[in-house]
Amino acid sequence: MDKIVVEGGASLKGEVKISGSKNAALPILVSSLLADGWNTYSNVPGLRDIKSIKQLLSYLGAKVETDGSTVRIDGSGLCKSEAPYDLVRKMRASILVLGPLVARLKKARVSLPGGCAIGARPINLHLKGLARLGASVELKHGYVEVSAERLKGNEIYFDIPTVTGTENLMMAAVLADGVTVLRNAACEPEIVALADVLNKMGADIHGAGASIITIKGVQSMHPVSVSIIPDRIEAGTFMVSAALTRGDITILDCQPAHMGTLIHKLRLTGTAIKIDGKNIHVIGSDEIESIDIKTLPYPGFPTDMQAQFMVLMLIAKGLSIISETVFENRFIHVSELRRMGADITISGNSAMIKGVPMLLGAPVIATDLRASASLILAGLVARGKTEVHRVYHLDRGYEAIEKKFARLGASIERVRE
């Protein structure tokens, strides 16, 4: 098992290129099951989650080839309708195969993914939606079993916006008879990216990026060649690192329009941000102002940036309050940050943070993907050495992040324990 060792104190400077989006790549790779023939996907990040989804697609019968950041998938060999526990347990996003399997094979048996460190994230909205499309849905022995001779379009209302639920039902509905309308759908850029790919494959989807999405079913789909959009959470993490270390970083090949709320909040802390096309130039301020944030579905402040932004507030001037409204257990990293000298008080779904003069390096344990990033950020600004253990979480969503930080001047390395 690896750990990341950070010696804090460096002011980060330079340029960093952003990798492809994990949260966009996963459903887009799964969409290959909807068509026969070779799909080509470029700018695919080299992550544990990407490896896991490729293994699952291969198990289901798809042919998968990888050449660097390019992945080719042929769904014509799709022959298995069951996604077993041993593969699904590695990653919750594996549930995304449910919609395409029912659409193409008329049945699916997928292991329930279970809970995770940041919250339960149930899939009941996925299942209610498939039932509205005419599918039979049963839960047996830890598996969800869905079957439908032919899916039929219908209106589906989500009680709360769900990203994977919206993606799953979009992929199911593209091959259904008639028109499907998703109401209170998730609006994230990754939803738009998937809809764009599906439309290139021959689907008829309108409204992605808004709360109402309309899908007119088609008879068949065809393969495509597409590029994965840049990862807005990785870009945001490097933006925070510039603010945190009073650095000067240019983030290359990102999409600033996807990060409007984060950019606004960072500017309120005194961070200077200049946008130039697909690049963002970030200069940290000598004095960081405390501000409050509240996580919300897109276009609100992203829950996936809450832990990283919290680290910035740890050394800001004054008091700040961070409210987490998306996941119920997303303050697990707080106890580790306290080990580094953070002054954080938790009350329900809110954290009150009092800025401190400095953080001190310490051994800490990562509990989830974004918590891993937050602990590395804390290490970058702390006095002394920080050891971040269990960084296998980190490798699920950040591609060689320690190498990117090292190129910006950080004293950081990955060490085999």
Image (cartoon, rainbow, N blue to C red):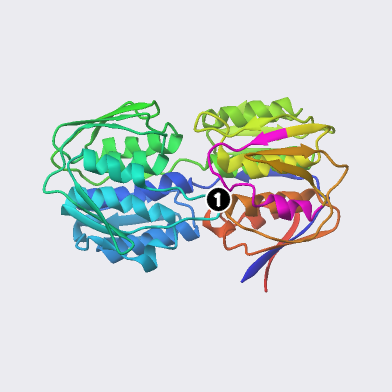
Residue 328's x, y, as percent?
Answer: 55, 44
Q: How many numbered marks does the figure carry?
A: 1
94 vs 1: above or below: above
Which corner quadrant of the image does residue 384 belong to?
A: bottom right
Query: Does residue 339 appear in this view?
Result: yes
Which residues are the magenta region?
A: 321-340
**Which is nearer the eye, 229 or 3?**
3
Helix, strand or loop: magenta stretch: loop
Image quadrant holding the N terminus, namely bottom right
Residue that mark 1 sits on: 118
**Please, what is the three-letter code of the amino acid marked with disc 1?**
Ile
The residue positioned 63% from the left and 64% from the top of the image is: 390
Residue 254 location, quadrant: top right
Question: Residue furthest toward the bottom?
Answer: 417
Could you say where residue 256 lies in the image, as x and y percent from the top left? 56, 30
- Left or right of residue 202: residue 113: right
Q: Is residue 329 magenta?
A: yes
Q: Residue furthest right?
A: 357
